[in-house]
Amino acid sequence: DFPLPAPNPFSESFPRDKFVGLFPGFLYMHRNPETIFPSHVKLILLSQSDFALPGLPGRPSQGAPKKYDFTFSGSDQDVAQDCVGWSSFAKNWTFAKQALEVMCGELRMTGVLVATKNKQGTKACSIPASCNGLITQTTFLNQDEFFSYVKQSRFLFLPQVHDASPRVITQALALDVPLLMNRNLIGGWKYLTASTGEFFNDASDIKESAQRLLAKAASGEYSPRRYVDDNAGDHIAG
């Protein structure tokens, strides 16, 4: 949410106007910057996620057979607190579990929940019982391990709202994997097009959106890698 104060209860709060006019220019990620910044501030829609993407520039990395329907990146979840904490709020874990009830219980999807086990691999964040046998939970992974799971998935699942343009979005696109994205995501919304994936609004339409994504992916209607070739990476964004 920066430069606005974050609603994350595990973040330090500050006055709404503390940073918005402090600098002559801002690299922003928001949909409606004119409602946030004073008119004298120069603005560029640019995020870290526009840069340093796997395999760019150059040939796409070799794909992999699809073993899972989706991968979810939990970053470094607060496993000891059953995924209650700063990172878990940022990843919208509470809603993610609601979505899993649909994705596992109704659609029988398989998936990978990255960083939802502690680093010792001895404790995992709780997930719906309907996901038993369908979901793989991992510890925090290095980047190559994470990319391997993404490449084996039909889409990347992004339930979060208050997350600053997650780099995993463009990383997945660079690996030619489409997105199932929360329409309310503060940063990263700009990467979702008709060729890169599907939005959902909330629990009321996630089933329909997921089914539409899988059907279109199966018929080859997405071209995520082509999107980043044309719009992102150091050779373009830099």
Image (cartoon, helix red, strand yellow):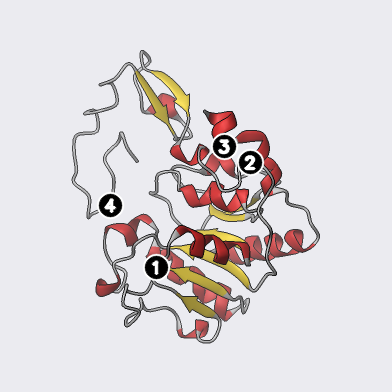
57 and 104: which is toward the camera: 57
Query: Are there few (<14), some (14-19), or many (20+) residues within 10 Å of tag 4?
Result: some
* Residue located beneath label 4 in the image: 8
Disc 4 vs disc 2: Cβ atoms closer than 8 Å?
Answer: no
Q: Is residue 139 above or below residue 186?
A: below
- For the point 81% across and 60% down, the residue is 219
Mark 4 belongs to which amino acid?
Asn
| Mark 1 and mark 2: Cα distance apart in space | 26 Å
Image coords of residue 74 (percent x, y): 41, 63
Q: Is residue 229 above or below residue 126?
A: above
Marked residue nearer the N-terminal end (3 or 2): 2
Q: Label 2 sits on what residue type?
A: Val
Q: Name the residue tied to disc 1.
A: 115
Q: Secondary structure at mark 4?
A: loop
Distance of label 3 from label 2 (alpha carbons): 7 Å
Q: Earlier in the sequence, mark 1 or mark 2?
A: 1
Quickly name the residue at label 3.
233
